[in-house]
Amino acid sequence: MLHDDGTFRECDRVWISYLTGRGDANGEGVGKLTTGYGSRPNPSEDGGKIGPEFTFGLTIEENTDAPILLIKTAWGGKSLFYDFRPPSAGVYPRTENDIQRDRNHEKDSGKYYRLMMAHVKSVLSDLGRVVPGYQEEQGYQLAGFVWFQGWNDVVNRDVYPRLPADSDQNRFAKYSQWMADFIRDVRSDLSDVDSGAAGLPFVIGVLGVDGDHPSPDHRQFREAMAAPATREAFRGNVAAVPTGPYWDEPLGAIASKFAAVRQKAYQLRTKQRGHENHGGSMTKEQQAEFMKEFERELISEEEIALWNRGASNAGYHYLGCGKTMAQIGEAFALAMLELQVNSGESSK
């Protein structure tokens, strides 16, 4: 990731087109792959973040002589059941909660799937715009697809209702079904631009928030995400890559302590029973001083320094930890390279 002088590398043979945005204000960032193509408030400007794309590109570059183009689409807060709903899953059926809250309208079912596919095809229709010097006679080959998502599905209890405690069913079984639909639909839709896409190598990045200590719901969700890779039709061309092993456990422990601080502050503000300010006897100034001391006793200076150095976001974004994202990107690339060997594509 770094040059000898400590500056970040820029890939020699890897370019990227990144579509992102908020609401309907989407835009594109293009250039040689380097840092800054993680989350971007302004699509055309370096967002100060990296995602898995950086080390993914670096690793693929190290293992092939061909020019490489990454086409990335990403938006915050999106689900598979609705936003990226694949066409063969049908239009999303709104729930009573959706209707009451005036959300998830049928017309936008699968909207981000369509935006994703339209962007991929748009980029491929004019590669010279993104890859300087590209000549049409060179042609191109779609080499693989990586899917990395999950939070907005795992926290949803409307589409994936809780089951009785004695149930042996996975409450996220529908996710497995829709993920399989998604893989088939992506391959079918991309066959329009590359006839070889029918067996396109596909990597599923399995949600790994909380690392080795997932909640029962998260454990079930991980199983549901990984399940399509075990289907007979997908053996050897779909891989499920766990990302839990790359969760930063020390940072996760500090995050839990910060959560305890926030909970204590909430108790003070709301005068909940069973804590130091029951009855509201403490002034705001006294509460602030109490909280400073509470945090100082709970979180050491060394932990604060580690947090400031290693974290930049919430847990559902893997704490915004660059080390975590770097390892995930490399794992995705290694899995993709193995799939390409299985499909006989590695020599092309």
Image (spheres, rainbow, N blue to C red):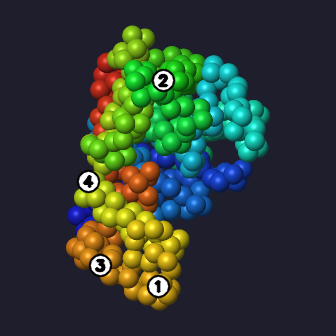
**Label at residue 282:** 1
In this picture, is 86 found above or below 66?
above
Q: Which residue is the extreme one toward the top?
A: 232
Give the mark nearer the N terminus: 2 vs 1.
2
User: The residue tagged with tag 2: helix, strand or loop?
Assistant: helix
User: The residue tagged with tag 4: helix, strand or loop?
Assistant: helix
Residue type at numbered disc 2: Ala
Mark 3 or 4: in front is 3
User: The residue tagged with tag 1: helix, strand or loop?
Assistant: loop
Residue type at numbered disc 3: Arg
* Corner quadrant of residue 306: bottom left
Tell me the residue that label 4 is attached to: 249
Give the mark nearer the N terminus: 4 vs 2.
2
Q: Are marks 2 and 1 in contact (CB under 8 Å)?
A: no
For disc 2, the neighbor class at 10 Å (few under 14, some 14 to 19, many from 20) is: some
Residue drawn 32% across and 35% down?
242
Give the mark nearer the N terminus: 3 vs 1.
1
| Closer to the camera in the image, 2 or 139 | 2
Left or right: 220 in relation to 305: right
Q: CA distance from mark 3 to mark 1?
A: 19 Å
Percent position of residue 263, x then y: 43, 65
**Quarter of the picture holding the N terminus:** bottom left
For disc 4, the neighbor class at 10 Å (few under 14, some 14 to 19, many from 20) is: some
| Closer to the camera in the image, 224 or 168 | 168
Tell me the residue that label 3 is attached to: 296
Mark 3 or 1: in front is 1
* Corner quadrant of residue 295: bottom left
Q: CA distance from mark 3 to mark 4?
A: 21 Å
* Corner quadrant of residue 93: top right
Give the mark nearer the N terminus: 3 vs 4.
4
Mark 4 or 2: in front is 2
Q: CA distance from mark 2 to mark 1?
A: 50 Å
